[in-house]
Image: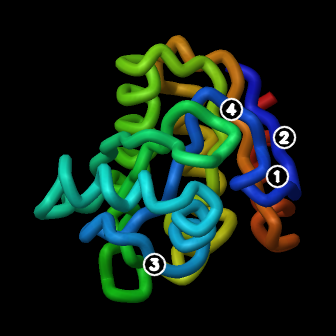
Amino acid sequence: MDIGLSTADITTVPADAIVNAAHHALRGGGGVDGAIHRAGGPAILAELIERYPNGTPTGTAVWTTAGELPATYVIHVVGPNFTAGQRDPELLESCYRNALRVADELGATTLALPAVSAGIYGWPAQSAAEIAVRTLRGTPTNVAEATFCLVEPRLYKAFRNATAAGE
């Protein structure tokens, strides 16, 4: 799998699927989640309410239409909230493994991803980057291209370091 880095807004990046860092209730929110819902339009939330009325647990992934986004699907993952004490790296790894599993089920070969849990959920940037890159590289998948969309310079730097370390 090719892993790329971009400073583009994730809602503008063409891909088969966009990965969303979602809240467990799956009802939209702030940060990446809010941006995806705003740009994708009401179809995403309507599908989430219909298909996942009780949300989904931390570490899991579900999918919906991408609405108006330049993708076919949105894969919603619920990252651990480091600030609230959810600090088990396995939960963060699970987000990425499950995103790849869902992508494979959908036939998606290109993904645009955020730095799950590294924003408002407070996961330290370098640790989040290392977990994300290691998990993507170590998980068997049909995904050929994964692009991390990192608008914050601290996250771009962390992911640049993590991708360089494994080359």
Q: Residues within 10 Å of mark 2 (few under 14, many from 20)?
A: few
114 relative to 33, above or below: above
Look at label 2 and name its amino acid: Ala
3 or 1: tag closer to the N-terminus? 3
Judging by the rendered image, the residue that carries numbered circle 3 is: 29
Judging by the rendered image, the residue that carries numbered circle 1 is: 161
Question: Image quarter for residue 55?
Answer: bottom left
The residue drawn where x is 45% and y is 26% is 103
97 relative to 128, above or below: above
Judging by the rendered image, the residue that carries numbered circle 4 is: 15
3 or 2: tag closer to the N-terminus? 3
Marks 4 and 3, how far apart at CA: 22 Å
Asked if labels 2 and 1 touch by Cβ distance under 8 angstroms, the answer is yes
Q: Residues within 10 Å of mark 3 (few under 14, many from 20)?
A: some
Tell whether 166 sits left or right of 29: right
Q: Secondary structure at mark 3?
A: loop
Tell whether 136 sits left or right of 85: right
Mark 4 or 2: the one toward you: 4
In which quadrant is the N terminus drawn?
Answer: top right
In this orientation, which residue lies closer to the viewer: 40 or 57? 40
Look at label 3 and name its amino acid: Gly
Look at label 4 and name its amino acid: Ala
The location of residue 97, given as percent across then percent down, is 40, 36
Q: Secondary structure at mark 2?
A: helix
Q: Is residue 56 visible?
A: yes
Marks 4 and 1, how far apart at CA: 24 Å
